Image (cartoon, rainbow, N blue to C red):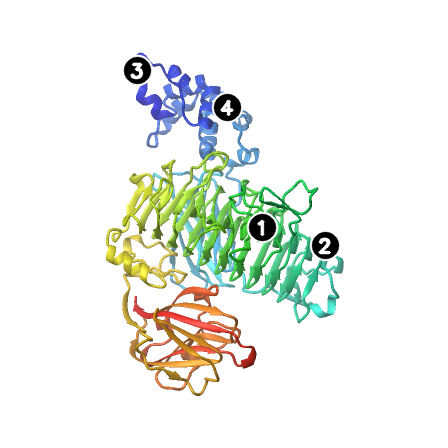
Amino acid sequence: MYNYVHTNISNNNTVNSLLADYKGPKNLSTVVEKYEDEIALLYKQHVLIPSPPISEDEKKARFANITSNQASVLFALYPIDTAKWMKIISTYSGLSKNDIYESAITAGLDPSIVFAASASGFTNTATPLINSVGIVIYGQDEDSVASVRFREEDDTHWRKGLDLSWEPIYGAFAGSIVYLNADTTYFIEVAVTDLNGNVEEHKFQTKTKPNSPPIDPDKIYYLSEIYSGGQLDLEALNIQGAANGYAKIIGDGPVIEAGNDVLSAVNIGNNSYIMLENLTVTGGERYGIFAKKAHHIWIKGCNVSGYGRRANDIRDGIAYSSTTSGSPINYDSGIYLERSGIAVIEECEVHSPNLSANSWQHGHPKGANALQVWAYHDSDLYRGEFIVRNNRFYGSHEHRFNDVIEGRMNTERRGGFVKNSAIYGNYLAYANDDVIEIDGGQQNVLVYNNEIEQGYAGISIAPNTLGPSYIFHNYIHNLGDETGKEWTAIKAGGLIAKPAGRTFIFENVIDVERNGIAASRVNGDTTFWVTSKNNIVFTQGSGNSAGYCIFDKEKYIGSTSINDLCFNQDTLDARYEFNFEYLQEHAYSDDIEYIESLKSVASPKLFISDGYQIPNFSGTIGLQLVTEKPEVTWELNPNDAVYEELTSQYEYGATIITAESAVTLTGNNWQIFPIDYKLTGNSMINLELAIEGSAEIIGIGFETDKDVDSNRVVRFVGSQNWGIDGTDSFSGTNSRVSFPIGKHITGQVNYLVLVLDNDKIKQSTNSSRAIFKNISITEN
């Protein structure tokens, strides 16, 4: 609007006449029509002019005579900058605070923001999760810089964190420290430096949460002792714990089987300090496991399936529970924690709901999800702090979730994960809409180290109503709903309509057919605010809305793309719809040979020069390792290799070699391949691994002789706790694996060992197999 007026004003065109003819976006045109005179005066007073920071005297001159209506205009035109305008107007104008609050409410802003935005009386926070800490410091100015450093209590070395991000709604700096150790005390220092070089220091001491909760030894319940069929109702049994000791229910054989006559198979209700471990849960009219207004819930190792309503009527492709029902079947959940907070869900499998969601062919998908979250507890003490880690939530090609992880009230700041939450280490697949949805409140919400596939969109952040959120080190690939259609790996939008959060997108590997980052409308608004850096994005297609690394029609001035490597395999080039002033491509973006080398390996690793390293993020072991340009120094050619059974371990089974450099093991089968290689501290083992069935050990060993040593075998999957733990490198039944073998084994290696160990399974019932493909070693 400003550019339109500034470009066209002349002796023949007054500001008012130009505003009267304004034909911009609908939302903005409505504001212009309502406040035409006030906007014209603000333009003439140079209040609307985009300019560098001005002196105190100039601020006093410009804002001294601001009226209530003019204040409403500023709030309506710049909803992202609520806190900034609140502070300027309250400091330099003659308006009272009540006048200012009423002006902001008149502009349609949320009163809870209006009354808090300019307050520096909020308590600064450092909120620990298990492997991260979220920080918020209030009462700040956008032009300042908030640098971070941290160290463990027993360490004298300070590590640099990523600078905190400006949060414009409450006028704060916020951000996260990641990849921390569990149950560890950290000292954190934040130095806020203003434009004049003045430094304000903030110090925190906090302890990350432990990997398991405290358990009350008098409140350990075995399922066989408390369950006799139907619903497991913890409210009725009056089972709950306390802060110093959770109540724990352990699955020891019985399966919880509930019919459709109860809302959920397991009812936690509003009982708190509850741990569920190793339960197998089926049934429930709506939910497998359900809690409402609870807090401190820990769900570990549970298997949930067969839940939710069935379709007894289909209308226009949408499922209803009966012919008389007025509402489609939606929001049924394997696990639903409603208006609950402070929860851990780990090592669970949620799959096979009773209903498959419809696709976009029949309108917005409706149906079941694996996990539904509404982390807005009645008490602010218990809001957010959800940890969802190391789970497998999956459907199938013909039987899909709506969203795999879904947030309720997800266009509101109180919706979804709300704040201080983390989703990591999961395998998530088969949705007809979003695979992960963190829409709504996203302050210090982290999504990382996940494998995501088979959805219409990968991760949705539309809208981000309060940031920052962080999406990093994820592997998003093989998208598509049941019809094969997809939209984008990361979906954003709604910055102006539902202001206003920023999302950091770091070092993900995205391999999709359509778009890397693209918008979806939220209340008609497709604007988004992202900081994208060091990502690998492979796309396909060259249509009007396909094949883009970033597809941003609004080109919001705050967004940047730095050092991303984007390649469209149809155009053989990068494709962007973006503000090119804020785009800086990776140095190898035009190096086709280098790009092909990335596409050819199981886990591509992007060369990142020192100037683009991200403090506390780059160089940390995640799904994608950020390292220098890798060199493949050895690879297995199984078609030419001489291999044999490892006699001390082999029991039975077949070994099949195919032309695709794949080795398939069946049975209880250990095979050794002679090699000649010297491992160094920088050695990485890379491969593609697919499994069918279960096993005690599936992995790879590096031996000097034909004996086997647990300290020289990496276990990627399996029920037996044996060998070097490489399970964090493998997710799902089919995964690309990169493991830093040089951190565990160095020196000469004479034999490569492929392992499928199944001692406890009878040969007659053993149908398990492991497929090892494209095995190589790189030096990083």
Q: CA distance from mark 2 to mark 3?
A: 72 Å
Q: CA distance from mark 1 to mark 4?
A: 42 Å
Q: CA distance from mark 1 to mark 2?
A: 20 Å
Label 4 crowd (10 A; few <14 / some 14-19 / many >=20): some
Q: Quadrant of the C terminus?
A: bottom left
Q: Secondary structure at mark 2?
A: loop
Q: Does the CB distance between marks 1 and 4 fall below 8 Å?
A: no
Q: Residue at x 40, y 86 (%)?
A: 707
Q: Does the CB distance between marks 4 and 2 fall below 8 Å?
A: no
**Residue 262: mark:** 2
Q: Position of residue 398 (x, y in %)?
A: 53, 55
Q: Earlier in the sequence, mark 1 or mark 4?
A: 4
Q: Which residue is mark 1?
A: 373
Q: CA distance from mark 1 to mark 3?
A: 55 Å
Q: Secondary structure at mark 4?
A: loop
Q: Quadrant of the N terminus?
A: top left
Q: Earlier in the sequence, mark 4 or mark 2?
A: 4
Q: Earlier in the sequence, mark 4 or mark 3?
A: 3
Q: Does the CB distance between marks 4 and 3 fall below 8 Å?
A: no
Residue 99 quadrant: top right
